[in-house]
Image (tube, rainbow, N blue to C red):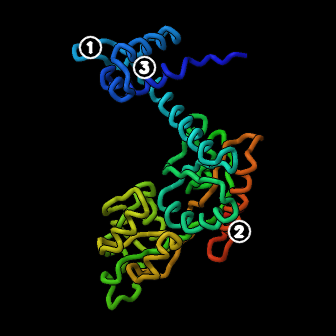
Amino acid sequence: MRRKIPPLQTLVCFDAAARHESYTRAAQELALTQSAVSRQIGTLEAFLGVALFRRTRHGVALTASGAAYARQISKRLEAMERDTLDAMAHQGEGGSLSLAAVPTFATRWLMPRLKGFAALQPDVVVHIETRTRPFLFADAEFDAALYAGTPAQVENWAGTRALLLMHEDVVPVCSPALLPRGKAVTPAAIAKMPLLQQSTRPDGWRQWFDAQQIDAPNARGGPRYELFSILAAAASHGLGVALMPTMLVADELARGELVVACARPLSGERNYYLVTPERADQRPLLKFFSDWLLEQARQPGTAPSSAARRAAA
């Protein structure tokens, strides 16, 4: 059956015109004339039966339908370009994986291990883009996602299956300059220190103080940062105490830029998962990567606890 797809040249012209909201600038980008771009847009609008642009005093502007279509077409063209470059690079061999990943986990845990994967699969390219929240795989060009979340969050991620990689333990860390003689202090002392917050985990400190049975009126106070990497940098520069997964600050701890402010780790409510679309035709390469990733997670110091595995079941 013939696919209901417009000519590729019309989509390329539309994508450029939509990004610039200008036929003239799109023509300059594509080395075409302004009239050629206009004709291609007209052909596409006739194919769709939808107006994509409206005339304005200063040129053209996207209609609501045009803006929605542009968002989708842009992603599809980017995926086509990536797949084409992969095919050109591998000449039919190897392949590629596209991963979405929470940023600090990707840079601090995954990246140091990818060289080992490359040794096993030298013809495979692993693409990584950052995502901090769930998304619809149907609307994204990802094979899988490395995600940190609660069992409930993973269970409610529609159309997916999740492989538990490891459980997360968090501990207070800070610059040694913030501690008397650089020595660890009590939970009560931590409650009086400036606290650094992780914006996607607003109750992290509250949970830690509750576990220590300490009253901490300022548990939700202090500057907020979205990424653990920024949180670690702020703590290293002496801005306060951060509640961090130790595996994500192993380098800073080894170099002495950070120290454990109070040796009272808390088993966090979040775990790390490999999330894939819920479909039966999983690619052999993705299955190989999943098995390799689970093997890496089971190495000493990173294996999930039995409690975490029960929670994810």
Q: CA distance from mark 2 to mark 3?
A: 51 Å
Q: Which image quarter is the C terminus in?
A: bottom right
Structural crowding at the residue carrying mark 3, measured as other residues with C-alpha within 10 Å and reported as few (<14), some (14–19) or many (≥20)? some
Amino acid type, residue under disc 3 in the picture = Gly
Where is residue 79? Give x, y as percent: 55, 37
Q: Which mark is residue 306?
A: 2
Q: Which image quarter is the N terminus in?
A: top right
Residue picked out by circle 3: 66
Q: Looking at the image, can residue 76 be seen?
A: yes
In front: 292, or 261?
292
Which residue shows up at 41% across the image and 11% down it? 39
Which residue shows up at 35% across the image and 25% down it? 26
Q: CA distance from mark 2 to mark 1?
A: 63 Å
- In terms of image quadrants, where is residue 148? bottom right
Amino acid type, residue under disc 2 in the picture = Ser
Name the element at disc 3. helix
Viewer-side label of 2, 3: 3
Q: Is residue 92 above or below residue 80?
A: below
Where is residue 259? Give x, y as percent: 41, 81
Q: Looking at the image, can residue 153 be seen?
A: no
Name the element at disc 2. helix
Amino acid type, residue under disc 1 in the picture = Thr
Residue picked out by circle 1: 56
Where is residue 81? Give x, y as percent: 53, 37
Which residue shows up at 35% across the image and 83% down it? 176
Contact flag, marks 2 and 3 (Cβ < 8 Å) = no
Where is residue 277? Give x, y as percent: 67, 42
Contact flag, marks 2 and 1 (Cβ < 8 Å) = no
Structural crowding at the residue carrying mark 2, measured as other residues with C-alpha within 10 Å and reported as few (<14), some (14–19) or many (≥20)? few
Is tag 2's residue or tag 3's residue first in the polypeptide sequence? 3
Viewer-side label of 2, 1: 1
Is tag 3's residue or tag 1's residue first in the polypeptide sequence? 1
